[in-house]
Amino acid sequence: MKEHLFLIGGSGFIGKNLVRCLHEQYAISVYDKFIDKEYFSHYPDVKTNLIELDKEKIAEDVESPDYIINLASIVTAERELSLFDSMIASNLKVMLNLYVRFKDDSRLKLFIQFGSSEEYGNEGSPFVETMREEPNSPYALVKQLTTNTAMMLHRNYGFPIMVVRPGNLFGPLQGGKKFIPYVIESLKQNAPLDVTPCEQKRDFIYVDDFAWAIGELLKNHEKAIGQIVNVSSGESVSLKQIIEHCKQRIGSKSEIKYGAIPYRENEVMNLCCSINKFKIMTAANINFNMFENLDKLVGGGKLELFLSPAIISSLKIAA
C-alpha cells in the first residue's frame, strides 16, 4: 500500500509538478482554494479537495496522512507593507490551522513547511541554514516568522515538522510573468526585452530535480524532523547568462535592453544556497544541470513535459 501524502496548496506550479513526479510513489491528496480540474483529470488516482485553509479545517474523518507538504503561500516581489495581513493569513495562519488539526495524529511522520531562500537577505552567499536571517521584504519577513514558528512547534510540542528553503524554481507550468518563462516566450516572438542590468545571480533548480529532492527528504524523514534545509542547485548563475543562453539556443533576434529597468532597492546580487546539509542528510548523489534543463523548456511545449509516462503511453496507443 502506498504511503499517503497531502499537498496543501497543491494546485499551483510547484504542487502540480510534485504530483507529476511523485504520484506513482505516493497516494496523493491535494487541498487548495482553486483546483485545476483539467490538469488533475490526467491523474485520476489523485484526490482533489476545494478548501480555503486559512478559514476552514480539513474534516476529522479524512484518512490520516503519512506526510504533509504545505505549499500554501502568496508569492510576490512587491514590498508594500499593506501586504502583511494577506501574507500572514496565507502562510502563518494556514500552518497553525494545520498544526491544530494534525498535532495529535500519530500516523504523521513528517510535515514539510515551505520557507524561502529570501529569508537570508543580501549578504553572506552561499547561504547556510545556521546563518542569522535578515529578510528585506514583507514576503521574506513573513516566511521567516513562519519558519521560526515551525521550529517552535517542534521544540516545544514535538511536532514532526521541518522547513525547506527552495532555490529559484523553474520548469513546466510556471506562470508566464516569472523570469524564465517571460524570457523564453519573448525571445521566441523576437520581442524586445526591457530588463535590469541582469548581473544579479540566482540559484535555479528545475522542478523535476526539486521533486526528486523532496522525495529524498520524505525517505529520510526521521533525520529531517526539526531541521531547516536548503533545497537548491548549490550554484548561482547571472540572469544575463540565462538570457544570452536562451537567445543563442532559440536563434532569436530580440533586442535585449539591459538596464532599461533599475534594480530593486536592496537587490540581492548573489543568491546562492549551500546544499551540504541536504547532501549529508540524504547521502544523495547530486547531479543538477541548470542549462541542460533550461534547454528542455526552450524546446518545450510538448505534452511529455506535463504528463506521467503511463499517460503518455496510453495517449500514443490511442493515437
Image: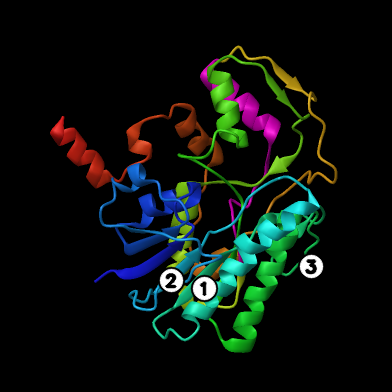
- Amino acid carrying mark 3 in the image: Arg
Q: Element under label 1?
A: helix
The magenta segment is: 229-251
Residue 249: in magenta span: yes
Decide: few, some or many residues near mark 1? Use Cα within 10 Å; few <14, some 14-19, many ≥20: some
Examine the rendered structure and indicate whether residue 192 appears above or below residue 136. above
User: Does residue 99 show up?
Assistant: yes
At 64% across and 24% down in the image, what residue appears? 244
Residue 74: in magenta span: no
Q: Element under label 3?
A: loop
Q: Which label lies toward us, 3 or 2?
A: 2
- Amino acid carrying mark 2 in the image: Ile
Q: Element under label 2?
A: loop
Q: Which residue is mark 1?
A: 98
**x, y percent for residue 261:** 79, 28
Q: Nearer the viewer, residue 128 or 28?
A: 28
Task: Tell me, for residue 259, which label it has, or none.
Answer: none
**x, y percent for residue 17:** 43, 49
At 58% across and 20% down in the image, what residue appears? 187
Q: Which residue is mark 3?
A: 132
**x, y percent for residue 219:** 42, 70
Q: Earlier in the sequence, mark 2 or mark 1?
A: 2
Give the alpha-carbon distance from disc 3 to disc 2, as whole Å.
35 Å
Give the alpha-carbon distance from disc 3 to disc 1, as whole Å.
27 Å
Q: Which residue is mark 2?
A: 58
At 33% across and 64% down in the image, what residue appears? 26
- Callout 2 touching callout 1 (CB < 8 Å): yes
Q: Earlier in the sequence, mark 3 or mark 1?
A: 1
Give the alpha-carbon distance from disc 2 to disc 1, as whole Å.
8 Å
